[in-house]
Amino acid sequence: MIKKISVLLIAALFVFAFAKTTVYAASDIEGPSVVHKEANQVFTIGDLLSMYEMDVFIDTDGYTGYGNVPGEYIVKLVQGRITKDVKIIVVEDWGNLEESNDVLYVSDYKDIYVSNKRALSLYEIIYYIYGTTGYVVTDYQFRYEEILDEYHYSFVDGVIPEGNYEFRFKLTYYSGEQATYSVVIHCVELRELPGMVLEPPKTAIENIMSALPWLLGAFALIYLFTHRKKKSGFSS
């Protein structure tokens, strides 16, 4: 009898553990939790939702309207009864990264979405992009070791086919620490945004500042003409 009860208890524990695991696995919306984007890059709520399943919707949006203002913003997603807070971090820039508009955004600190016509160098990836997101510590000297690079070896005449490319590497710091990194670089064809860029009219102060060099030049010429020495002549 005791043996039978023990077997039933063990079976019940297995059922409980399985149920708990199943609930936990379904307690989160599949997709990135953090997105980094540059202040001068367009990133919309539609771009965010494109990284999730079709039945994921916006519950609250604390980001729209601040995409060009550096800071951290929260967008709450909902999928059925499940919700998820996604943090969007707007950075001032990616350091000295040239053609930075070719980098669309970075998800979960590491997965880069970039134009398929822009070949990011190893230095740009590690120091400018991962150094900004905090995925890699770049304050100390380290040695780089390649494990898998599907990205750089897939370029032909400066263009890489659209798709997802694995990139794995190891860093050994002079402090003795080692770390292995595994990322995905998503290469997409950039499409030109429709419409034209319209800028707001200049303020009175901006008009004065833009005219200041001309005013200074005019004052300088007037000063030179009014203070130049008269040529000496011969008197009769």
Image: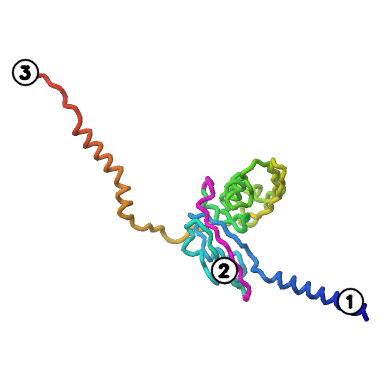
Q: Gap between marks 2 and 3, in whole Å?
A: 95 Å
Which residue lies under the disc numbered 3? 236
Who comes first in sequence, dot 2 or dot 3? 2
Q: Quick check: marks 3 and 1 in contact, CB under 8 Å? A: no
Q: Is residue 94 magenta?
A: yes
Q: Nearer the viewer, residue 89 or 210?
A: 89
Nearer the camera: disc 2 or disc 3: 2
* Residue at 58% over, 59% down: 35
Nearer the camera: disc 3 or disc 1: 1
Q: Which residues are magenta?
A: 80-98
User: Circle 1 — which element?
Assistant: helix
* Residue at 62% over, 47% down: 126
Considering only vertical position in the picture, is 198 above or below 10?
Answer: above
Task: Say what amino acid the circle numbered 3 marks.
Answer: Ser
- Report the colour scheme: rainbow
Q: Position of residue 157 (x, y in %)?
A: 59, 46
**Mark 3 Cα-neighbour bin, 10 Å: few <14, some 14–19, many ≥20:** few
Which residue lies under the disc numbered 1? 6
Q: Quick check: marks 1 and 2 in contact, CB under 8 Å? A: no
Task: Say what amino acid the circle numbered 1 marks.
Answer: Ser
Residue 157 in view (yes/no): no
Q: Position of residue 106 (x, y in %)?
A: 59, 56
Quarter of the view holding residue 173: top right
**Mark 1 Cα-neighbour bin, 10 Å: few <14, some 14–19, many ≥20:** few
Which residue lies under the disc numbered 2? 76
